[in-house]
Image (cartoon, grey):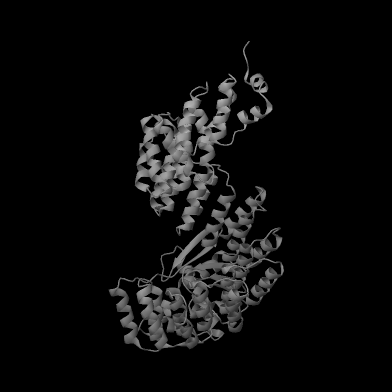
Amino acid sequence: MKITMSSSLHSLPSPAQTLVSNFNSPLELKQAHAHLIKTNSPLSLIPPSRVASVCALSLADVSYAHRLLTHFPQPQIVVWNSCLKTLAESDSPFDAIVLFCRLRDLDVVPDSFTCAFVLKACTALLDDKNGKIVHGVIEKLGFHWNLVLQNMILNLYGLCGEMSTARLVFDKMPQRDVVSWNVMITHLVKSGDFEGAYRLFSCMPERNVRSWTMMISSCVHNGKPREGVELFMEMEKIGVQANEITVVAVLSACADLGALDLGKRVHEYSKRSGFGRNVRVLNTLIDMYVKCGCLEEARTVFEEMEERTVVSWSAMIQGLAIHGQAQEALRVFSMMIETGMMPNGVTFIGLLHACSHMGLVDEGRRFFSGMTRDYGIIPEIEHYGCMVDLYSRAGLLQEAHEFIMNMPLKPNGVVWGALLGGCKVHKNIELAEEATRHLARLDPLNDGYYIVLSNIYAEAERWEDAVRVRKLMKNRGVKKTPGCSSIMVDGVIHEFVAGDDSHSQAIEIFDMWEKLVDHMRQRGYKPDTSVVLLDVEEKEKEKFLYRHSEKLALCFGLINTPPGSLIRIMKNLRVCEDCHAAFKLISSIVNREIVVRDRNRFHCFKDGACSCQGYW
């Protein structure tokens, strides 16, 4: 009669049954083995997977298990694969690599699953050295046709920074799927080769939502939001449905561009697609609306959130700050603390910005000292920069200078730049020169710092010094960043560069500006030509002044949008004093609200006033 494993096992005494099926060490396994021999019972009563697991971590025991498993009908490598998988996914994946090496020494031939589990361990450890050994085994055994293994190898080399090897593997792959392309592009992006990643993306034979999302996100992170939006439009056109991660990436691009219409459309899509409660999507929506100048829409998203994170609160505080609503920002912070939400470093950057933009020096001091005392947050360089900005804007330049000199961190270009900005407003040439000396060493190619110092000299009518700074810029190869402003009309973004007269509506734009100037002069407007750094006649200075990019964008908006509608303008540089004064008057003349986002903050011009209340 044939004895089955079940009937044989039940024929053993109860303690023996436990020993044979539940041994927990090599010693107990050997006792069970001896018992089966003594009782003339079949070895098949021993669970083979348990044999492998209890012997895996010792060289001698692996050898014993190997000999034992040769008596089982099941292929030995199948048993070891189960053990390798467990080890690779454990807290000690190196054990899987060690076991693999021991099995090779015992001439146990691996299969594709073996290689996959060991590659998983190598990936967890970023172990490219052993990964190359496994790669060699794969090539030797002819598994190079296995796409899963090839993708794992590609990913391992990419994660380990072996980009030339990864590219070689990718180029030599006998076949590729969308995963192969995605892996290669991901690691090109992470290695900083955005252009290479974009070229590869353009060559993809097929793309999934992950491919599109990855490239859109990469465009945003590499300062190319316009290209990111264009990719999203193309993705929509071919019918690929965006997921939550795509939505976040596109909203970030809209925030950078000020593309409000598209941002609103993506917001509606996220609601229809069930992403309306996704906290990350909602946080990005707050940021998008804030950066597009729609503070009330951002507030609505914030107030309707069922769950808020510290990112949600911080985004709202920062949004209120850059829109000049400092007191409201402080009120939201109080609400945040009342709910039990602990702030982080980003929260305090928003609070300090609020205090800085509105001249709340005492409140800023309290927040700066309280972040460590009350919340255990160590100030970083950004917080020190905010404090220098706070003191400098308020005219406390000596206090700002002392603060810099006593900082526990080495001041960077942003810190000295904040002091320089205050020196310009409050006309302190001596400190401006000191700040510029530091900036010339820390950030030698930043044109903004040279221009501010040149501006300070020009306002003091020290023309020779202003010219000397300009020559210094030229000798050092520093080029002035041209002012550029954009405005969206009917879903199309229109860009204007300072002095540009090539626009198709240039004549209408200049006529509109002349009409506005006539109205402004009747209200006491005098062009502030001090911002023009050229030693030329006053009329020539006015001509340069009237061609600032934000003025061109405003006139275009007034011509091409319905009367009474809000105008939003984005500028890459700071709004100059003359444009600021002019826009206040124009908002009253045309009875329009004009929102301008410059490099530092938002300016909401309405009824002849600006939200910055002088602290801009």
Q: Nearer the viewer, residue 218 or 118?
A: 118
Q: Residue 343's image quarter?
A: bottom right
Can I make out residue 57 in this image? yes
Number of labelled discs?
0
Q: Please, is residue 474 above or below residue 264 in the view?
A: below
Residue most toward the front?
Answer: 38
Residue most toward the top?
Answer: 1
Percent coordinates x, y for residue 573 in the rendering = 46, 71
48 displayed left or right of 405? right
Q: Nearer the viewer, residue 339 or 58?
A: 58
Q: Please, is residue 104 above or below residue 404 in the view?
A: above
Q: Nearer the viewer, residue 377 or 34?
A: 34
443 displayed left or right of 370? left
Can I make out residue 540 in this image? no
Q: Where the N terminus falls, by quadrant?
A: top right
Percent coordinates x, y for residue 310 in the rendering = 63, 64
Identify which residue is drawn at 41% across, 37% down: 101
Q: Please, is residue 390 above or below residue 335 in the view?
A: below
Percent coordinates x, y for residue 232 in the rendering = 52, 50
Identify which residue is drawn at 43% across, 88% down: 428
Identify which residue is drawn at 56% across, 65% down: 291
Q: Where the C terminus falls, by quadrant?
A: bottom right
543 displayed left or right of 267? left
Percent coordinates x, y for residue 9 in the rendering = 65, 23
Q: Residue 596's image quarter?
A: bottom right
Q: Residue 457's image quarter?
A: bottom left
Identify which residue is drawn at 47% across, 26% down: 67
